[in-house]
Amino acid sequence: MALCGGVGALALPSELIVHIFSFLSDRDKLRASVVCSRWRECLFYPALWTELKLRLGGTVNGGGSGPAETPKLEFLMRKFGSFVRELELEFSPVEGYPGPVLGVEPDGHDPQLTARWTDAMNCYLDQVICVLRSLRNNRNLQKLSLYGATCILQEEGILERTHPDQDTQGSKKIKEVQQLFEQVLANSRQLKWLGCAFMLGVITPHSLPALSNLSAASLEHLSLLDGQTPPPLQDQTPPSTENQAPPLLRSPELERLPRLCSLALDFHHFTSAMCHALSGGGRAPLLRLSLLLGGTAPPESPPSEEDWRALVRRSAGLRVYLMALDGRSEDLLRVLKPSLPLEQLHFDSYAACSAGALELVSLQYHKTLTHFSLVRDNARFPDLSDNRNEDPLVLLAWRCTRLSLLVLHGYTVWAHNLIAISRLRGSSLKVLAVPEESIHFDPHQAQDPEEDPLHHLIKEVSLGLGRSWSPALDSALLLNDPTQHFYREAQSFSAAV
């Protein structure tokens, strides 16, 4: 590449330069393009950039990211938007939010803060418009994945103040975003993967019907998730179903998607009617289903046991990933039917999971469960084994013979039970993550009085697992953005098909 400035390099045909570029990493392509104008002209040849992954940061403090990224985004989309085959766009969480993460309560009466949030929303909308304008005439598009950690703007009431029915600058931008997204879907010809998760103001119940018939016939993965308000806690009244957002996907629309084999939805949108539609003949079997339970009232008409049986008969290879976020054990018990082929379960809530719910999981899904995460961010550490002959976590490890990942945080885990779990599952338990703060030691358990209890635990668990083990870092198990975690896990879960 050091010879690119020579006459020989300048005289090379563009086809050969593009062929050379095809063997280089993205970083090396950029380095080579700096040397001479001839090679720089070939840098943006469509065949070299079939995939594009973009991550945009959000800030309300005016530094480092946000509006400063817009010109870069415009340049990239101008170069690639009309022909790129796969585009993944992710908006990182808005920085500077004075909420629970920073230990500060937001001041709703601060005009400067309100202005900054408005600027953040306008920047977000401008960037979304930039992307969709470049994509609307792209007929090569096969994968479109959009994720925006912008729910906080919805919580702050920014969206309500710029409602699409209002005649304001913000509302006009939201209307344009929705129209552009529908145009992208209408003009597409070979979409196989469509994902839109927590994208403020982008997707509506009218979006998916705009999808062209050609793309509807080829679509294999669909992910539609929106941001909802948190569910009520124990002493609160559930919100009225009249105030809930309408579903982004309705069961009759599934008839247009005969090749769909992977689906990710809010659980309150996955109804009995939808389960019945997926069980019909003349369509590909559903292989992956990712469901987010939480952020709204419990589902009004969840699939029954008969619905799940019919779906599993039609789709024998179906596996389900369920994340229960800020919910209650009662909500979980309501939707966990015996025939639901649950493979991964993540319960992340301030409300403690009950021992009864844990018992149900270990009994019903002992043949399918591989991943189980139980996370609670609270100063209290409830003991699930309290007043029980057998610890429910040990029973889960004993019954669930395919368990390969176990994450525990915010609950009391007795050291001797942790040792038992490691011995029961052995080397097949690839991940055992428990912070030191959750581990309790029974003073009545016999052990060498001169040996440190934690050192003894680490030694015994390591022996049980057949590899070196140590307690996890407390901060590593807490999710700053659970919706982002669900989005990424659902992506990986579906990509395995």
Image (spheres, rainbow, N blue to C red):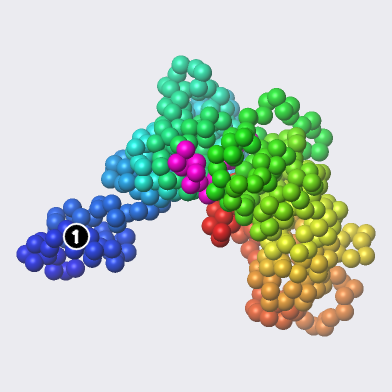
Residue 233 against residue 447 in the figure, above or below: above
Residue sitting at x 32%, y 64%: 25
Query: Which residue in the protein does label 1 denote?
Result: 15
Q: Position of residue 380 (x, y in %)?
A: 78, 52
Q: Quadrant of the C terminus?
A: bottom right
| Magenta span | 213-228
Q: Could you tell me which secondary element the residue under label 1 belongs to?
A: helix
Residue sitting at x 38%, y 50%: 85
Q: Residue pushed farthest front?
A: 282
- Left or right? Give the position of 45 relative to 372: left
Specify whether residue 353 is in view.
Answer: no
Q: Nearer the viewer, residue 118 or 170?
A: 170
Q: Position of residue 92 (x, y in %)?
A: 48, 46
Label 1: how many Cα within 10 Å (few below 14, some 14–19, many 20+): few
Q: How many marks?
A: 1
Could you say which quadrant of the image residue 276 lies in? top right
Q: Position of residue 117 (x, y in %)?
A: 49, 31
